[in-house]
């Protein structure tokens, strides 16, 4: 498949003080279905370089303009190659084993995705009587489908504060909320899982607008999905 391009433009008028910007670039890679490519940019910034967050691995273009610079602007183009990918859970393959560090990262609690307290208690109730990891993950997935809902009034993609969701009983939200809840419930069972954030760049083959991009303009096509290691 030809590389897909994502172009970001940022312009600010009449800035005060020192202006900086951090623009995300395609940094996630999976040999089965996604390969990040080249990033190029044009800007009037005094300094621009790619930086990586050591905790999450997310990569960004960090820009700094001179204090008082007029009309800071930047145009960033990211290339990536992607393809359709599916897994038959009835006949799983033999994925590469996770390293100890990968397992630690993908089972760890975070500020917004705790794995103890009400999250663990809820997860234990959901998987009660289930056997292996696949059965537990399937039970959690079905619970998410039956008990949560997309709330169009939620701002942005949501914030993913799953303990607050469970304590309030309000299980509505958007992708960052619902996928984070799934990840937290799975991780609390010691099963590796993670959120994957990105942009929808192709129309959905299933005909769902929310699963794909409606045009080449993907300004509002940010999305979050979850993955689990079995």
Image: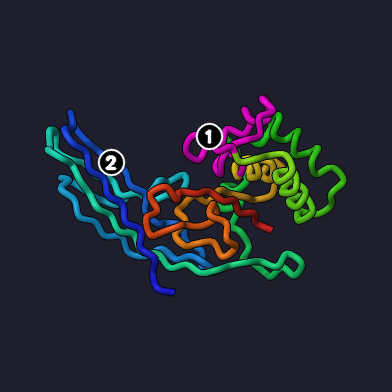
Q: Is 197 displayed left or right of 127 in the figure?
A: left
Which residue is at a point 65% across and 56% down the rendered structure image?
Answer: 229
Q: Is residue 120 above or below residue 52?
A: above
Residue highlighted by disc 1: 154
Q: Is residue 163 above or below residue 53?
A: above
Q: Nearer the viewer, residue 115 or 227?
A: 227
Q: Secondary structure at mark 1?
A: loop
Residue highlighted by disc 2: 21
The residue segment tinted magenta is 151-178
Q: Is residue 78 above or below residue 106?
A: below
* Mark 2 or 1, closer to the camera: 1
Which residue is at a point 46% across and 44% down the rendered structure image?
Answer: 55
The CA distance from mark 2 to mark 1 is 25 Å
Q: Nearer the viewer, residue 177 or 57?
A: 177
Contact between marks 2 and 1 (CB within 8 A): the answer is no
Q: Nearer the viewer, residue 14 or 204?
A: 204
- Across and down, in percent, residue 61 comes to 30, 49
Reply yes or no: does residue 165 show up in magenta.
yes
- Across and down, in percent, residue 125 comes to 81, 37
Q: Is 188 displayed left or right of 58 in the figure?
A: right
Q: Quadrant of the N terminus?
A: bottom left
């Amino acid at each position: 498949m030809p590389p897909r391009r994502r172009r970001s433009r940022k312009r600010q008028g009449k800035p005060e003080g020192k202006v900086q910007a951090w623009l995300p670039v395609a940094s996630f890679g999976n040999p089965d279905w996604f390969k990040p490519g080249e990033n190029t940019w044009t800007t009037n910034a005094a300094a621009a370089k790619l930086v990586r967050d050591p905790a999450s691995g997310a990569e960004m273009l960090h820009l700094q303009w001179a204090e008082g610079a007029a009309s800071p602007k930047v145009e960033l183009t990211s290339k990536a190659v992607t393809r359709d990918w599916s897994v038959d859970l009835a006949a799983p393959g033999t994925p590469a084993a996770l390293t100890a560090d990968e397992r630690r990262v993908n089972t760890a609690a975070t500020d917004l995705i705790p794995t103890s307290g009400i999250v663990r208690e809820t997860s234990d109730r959901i998987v009660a009587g289930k056997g292996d990891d696949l059965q537990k993950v399937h039970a959690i997935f079905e619970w998410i489908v039956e008990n949560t809902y997309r709330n169009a009034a939620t701002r942005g993609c949501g914030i993913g504060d799953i303990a607050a969701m469970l304590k309030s009983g309000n299980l509505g939200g958007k992708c960052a909320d619902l996928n984070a809840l799934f990840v937290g419930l799975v991780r609390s069972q010691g099963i590796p899982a993670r959120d994957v954030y990105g942009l929808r760049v192709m129309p959905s083959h299933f005909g769902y607008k929310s699963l794909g991009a409606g045009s080449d303009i993907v300004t509002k096509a940010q999305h979050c999905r979850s993955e689990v290691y079995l």
